[in-house]
Image (cartoon, rainbow, N blue to C red):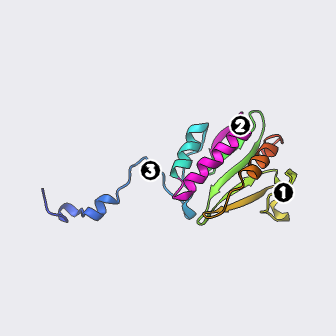
Amino acid sequence: MPPSGERGETPARASAVTSPDTPKLLSGGNPQIPKGDGDGPVQAYIAAMPGWKSGLGRRLDELVMRAAPDARKAVLWNSPFYGSPEGGWFVSFHVLTKYVKVTFFDGLSLTPVPPGGTPKSGQARWIDIYEHDELDDAQMTEWIRQAAALPGWTP
């Protein structure tokens, strides 16, 4: 066996090699997942979310599917989207450097209105979830239930 450093490979470099199946993390740590319909691409996105964000992604996915069991899923624009079986998208989430943004596309129609947004945001409203935030499962479930009953956003 050649000593370390021969053939241009050191132990440190060898350990940094990633699998070709490992998704690239884009700016802010958002996983680059190919566009696709169904649970598979969404689960691939969630698995690739870095650190604590992956656990939050699993929890959000569970809350959506409990509140809206017939929701369809897809990855679009490197984010999981959830929509009604026959209509538009009602919620999505996206990884940013320090938080996960959960966007309700018709958020102004929800009660209470989610806290994120400005008049320039149109109907969309969101909540930013940071690592040490306590997620209010009951409120998130209620927003999801309300959002799933609306027509949703169609790109």
Residue 22: image tag:
3
Q: Could you classify mark 1 by the number of other residues whose Cα lies within 10 Å: few (under 14), some (14-19), or many (20 or more)?
A: some
Q: CA distance from mark 3 to mark 2?
A: 27 Å
Mark 1 vs 3, N-terminal side: 3
Rendered image quadrant of residue 114? bottom right
Pointer 2: what residue? 71
Mark 3 vs 2, N-terminal side: 3
Q: Can the viewer see residue 80 in this picture?
A: no
> 70 or 13: nearer the eye?
70
> In percent of the image, x 56 and y 48: which residue is there?
46
Type of the residue with mark 3: Thr
Q: Is residue 142 above or below residue 68?
A: below
> In percent of the image, x 83 and y 64: which residue is there?
120
> In percent of the image, x 73 and y 54: which residue is there?
103
Judged left or right of residue 66, residue 120 is right
Pointer 1: what residue? 113
